[in-house]
Amino acid sequence: MSEPILRRLSFTLYLALPVALTGCAGLETPVWLQSLYSTDSSQTYDTQKQTLDELLVQLQSDENTAQQAVSVKSSAIPGNNSPVGKNSALSRTTSEPAWNQSSLQDLKLANGTTRASLRESVERALLGSQQIMSSFQNFQAALQGQEIDRGRLMPQVNFQGQAGYDWRYRSPQPPSSESWNRSGMNLGLSQLLYDGNATRNTVKQLGLEKLATYYDLLTTTDAVANEAVNAYIDVVRYRHMIELAQENYNIHKKTLGLLSERLDSGVGRGVDTEHAAGRLALAQTNLMTENNNLNNVNQRYRRLMGDLPPKHIAPVPEPRLPTASEMTNFGMAIRNNPDILSKQAMVQAAQASTDAARGNFSPTLELRASTSSERDNPTSSNYGALNNRVEVVMNYALFRGGSDTARLRQSSAQTLSARNVRDHTCRNLQQELSTTWNDIQRTRAQLPFLKDHEKSMEKVSVAAEQQFQIGQRSLLDLLDTANELFDSRRARLNGEYDLLKLEYRWLALAHRLLPELGLAEPLGTRPAESSELLLPDEVIQACAAPIPDTKNLAPGGLVYQNDGLPPIIRAASKSGR
């Protein structure tokens, strides 16, 4: 069977599969199929055949499209060579084939592979992160460190055995000596009864330090997840940027060819050709820059996820953020942030260290029990006797050179230092939450204008092309409008992707990124000391502030005056949102 027949057979199956699936699932027929299976009698066979041939040519432009065709929503973000839906929130607004507007989002690729999703990519980054593994091992080390001191609260059992040879010499008169074999054993048990709660407070201190390492693990997890999200978004971003840069380059290359033909035929000007050649060189450098940006992002993606990004990447889901009406400040976000919780755990650990230092001023009571047998001095009547002993021993240090007092002052200073670190962290967190929130509101306010700018430039581009056809515009004028359209599309795409990165960053600061992605925390259960962690309300109130007022981001408006006077710009309102 010839290759053209195979291609047409594959294309026929490609058309039939969505029809069968939509019929079985009760879904609406995709838009791109409605043009082929229209029941309108006015559509002739030749028209349908022409439409079919156009789609076939479009499919043959990519050798893998017929085998890897995937249906996506109008808001889907395709790979390098895939067109973007016209109504896509993360796509360039331009005229594109209608066959990409299918509603069958969940279809796998024809070869059985699936697109990489944001959730799967972040999960791979978390599982392969050395930073997370290092933080986890620090947590395990802190856990065992607590168990070391916890063992001091348990009974201590010791066994001692001995064997040797003794001899005795008497002098001066008359000199004599004797010797014998000596052996013995001792089995002893000791139990700490009281030490001013120094050991218990030390165990508590180490438990809170362990809790701090647990929250450090969560902080590292949020940071790695946010970095993975940024890498994923940037891969999609620069794939789109390459599409725009390639399209811009093709326009400049085509225009230069037309100008060169006119120059060769004697109706063009050399300066116009040189001008177009210079712009083509600039378009080439823009394309090279975008390709290099994608190469760099691919390496960042590989470092985080362990492999280069696949050809097909799923759209970036839009995160759910609380609205300004749902909260008055960022207090809850601060309370949930693991970084501030880690610092609070260190404050309480320092306080427990102070309590342990005070215990050194108290006496120590121990219960001791032992049994021993020693074969010493064969002439004694107790030779080889079994000795049993039970006693309570008190040890009271009267003077240790001032070390206990110095230890108390040291722990008190460490407590004050930990509080300052906690308050500083809280202020920084409040600032980051506020500035990120401001950037989110600013980008949201700018996006409608960026989209309007892009739509306006599209209309200008169409009008300029129409004017060129009737001789009112030159090819260089078309290049000017093409450059402005290219810049407007880049600005709009950058705004949309910047907004996504800001929203996911805010979720990471509020410790809500993993739940948003449907991922669990590194450990199933939190340490028992988490129930003892108390973050005072006054600490939150001291650093928390109301949600930033972004009323000054409201755009100004034009006020048209009477009597033919020019319009004036009305300043943004300073009160009210």
Image (spheres, helix red, strand yellow):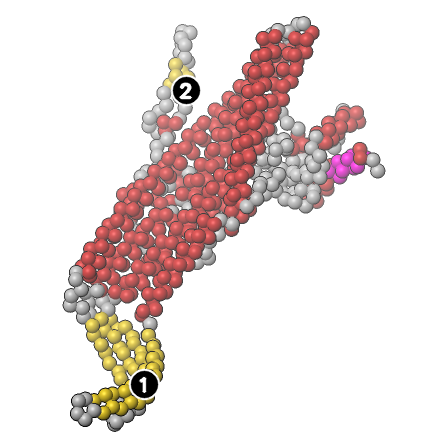
Residue shown at the point (37%, 23%) measured from the top left: 572
Name the image quarter holding residue 254. Answer: top right
Indicate the secondary structure of the residue bearing disc 2.
Answer: strand
Spot occupied by residue 69 in the image (x, y as percentages of width and height): 68, 38
What residue range appears in magenta? Answer: 5-14
| Rendering coords of residue 440 (x, y %) | 43, 34
- 43 relative to 444 in the view: left or right: right
Residue 482, quarter of the rendered image: top right
Q: Considering depth in this image, is 38 or 303 the residue closer to the camera?
A: 303
The answer to which of marks 1 and 2 sits earlier in the sequence is 1
* Amino acid type, residue under disc 1 in the picture: Tyr
Magenta highlight on residue 310: no
Residue at image mark 1 = 165
Residue 184 seen in the figure: no
Q: State which quarter of the image contains the C terminus.
A: top left
Disc 1 on helix, strand or loop? strand
